[in-house]
Image (tube, coloured by chain):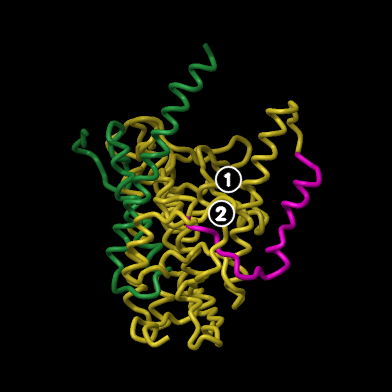
Chain colours: A yellow, B green
Amino acid sequence: MFFRSPLVCSLRASGQEECFGDFQFATFIGARDLFLRKVYWVYWVWWVWWVWWWAGIKLNGQTSFPTGNLFLLSLFPPGFVLPAPKIVFPRTCCPLTSARIGIALQPDFRRTVLPASFMPESPHQPAEEHFQPVAGLLAFVLPGLGHAWLGDTKRGLLIAAGILGLFFGGLLVAGLDAVDSGLYFANKIRASQGKAPHQSEGGDAIWFAGQMFVGPVAFAVDAVHQYGFKIREPIAGNGAAFKFRPPLPDEERQSSGPNVGMSNGRSPSNVPSYRRALGRVGEIGTLCAMLAGLLNLIAIIDATWHAPRLGRVRRAKL
Amino acid sequence: MILTLGHRFFIDPLDLHSLWWLLLVPMSILIAMAYKAIRLPDLSRYWRQVASMSAQVVLAMIGLAAASFVIIELFVRHMSE
């Protein structure tokens, strides 16, 4: 007996069921299918590892890295090396969302509905998937540009609206403090040139690791933040390198002269720096900007390994 | 919410510390916009799907908050006493 949520049932009745197929592990068709399945397995391994570690701490007082047969098996699940056959997680796990989480209580073999991106032209032929490196590059340069270049302009515009809206929404909420690489890449470049690295204070390089997938926009905003608004302090004994730090409350920067960017207290020639984002506001702004980057990573993958979507008319013929 | 005269948008943070939770709604809408634009095979029902996913995300967050509240306020307090 299957429990089906009213939402899924209504969508099935209206013919939109394929939209709920994103998390189904369906028949192996193409490279992207295998890639996505690997991504899902990474999630599972990460989850199993934490549960295993937590259980070790709780049950045995173990705090070291967990080992054992179960943990080693979880590192090499069958999905990594073998294309899974038709395994469809039942729709019993979460009635509110489309995510199939948990263990398959009773696999639904009666009707497998593939995501439409995997929808074959005929029942025996998979959808053709093309490797489009230029589209992937364009998707990185500007969110949505890859899909627009492939001819799906409306989809590209919607992707751009969502991702750039999320990124600049984060900036609007938390200000410049939402994007702060902590001079990570700038110092890599300086090190490659044999220069002493700058010091940075208050950077969020880990968050920027996700935000950078928005593309040059993220790097430009970060550069404006680092070099246009942070306070520079000379490092004693090293005149070529500075310490870049966020301003103290109401601290101002010098706007002209040889010491642009440095602080010397209040002065008519100084310009106000920025205020740091604290608390929940800072967290949500940073999170929005990072989610924008991660969503654009999905868009980049989708544009690079692109399978043209079949329209409603073509799907109806199948 | 107090916006001072010298506030500069996109540079200074908004003073929404008492209403931060409202920001989760536009965030979930924008996430759904981007995700559904990538994943939907047919964009004819795009906005309906976006509304559906946004509602699911918001309801899930409310559910998680309620569950966290129950665990922290009832279960953990009971364990500590």
Q: Which mark is residue A198?
A: 1
Which amino acid does the dot numbered 1 rest on?
His
The subunit carrying tag 2 is: A
Residue range corresponding to the magenta coloring: A66-91
The number of numbered badges drawn on the structure is 2
Residue nearest the observer in this picture, A164 or B12: A164
2 and 1 marks on the same chain: yes
Residue A260 among those drawn in magenta: no
Task: Residue A305: name its quadrant.
Answer: bottom right
Which amino acid does the dot numbered 2 rest on?
Ala
Identify the residue under disc 2: A186
Residue located farthest toward the front when viewing the structure as drawn = A1
Residue nearest the observer in this picture, A72 or A149: A72
Q: Position of residue A86 (x, y in %)?
A: 60, 70
Residue nearest the observer in this picture, A11 or A152: A11
Judged from the image, the secondary structure of the residue bearing numbered disc 1 is loop
The subunit carrying tag 1 is: A
- Label 2 with label 1: CB-CB less than 8 Å: yes
Mark yes or no: residue A295 visible.
yes
Q: From mark 2 to mark 1, how far is it between C-alphas?
A: 8 Å
Residue located farthest toward the left when viewing the structure as drawn = B5
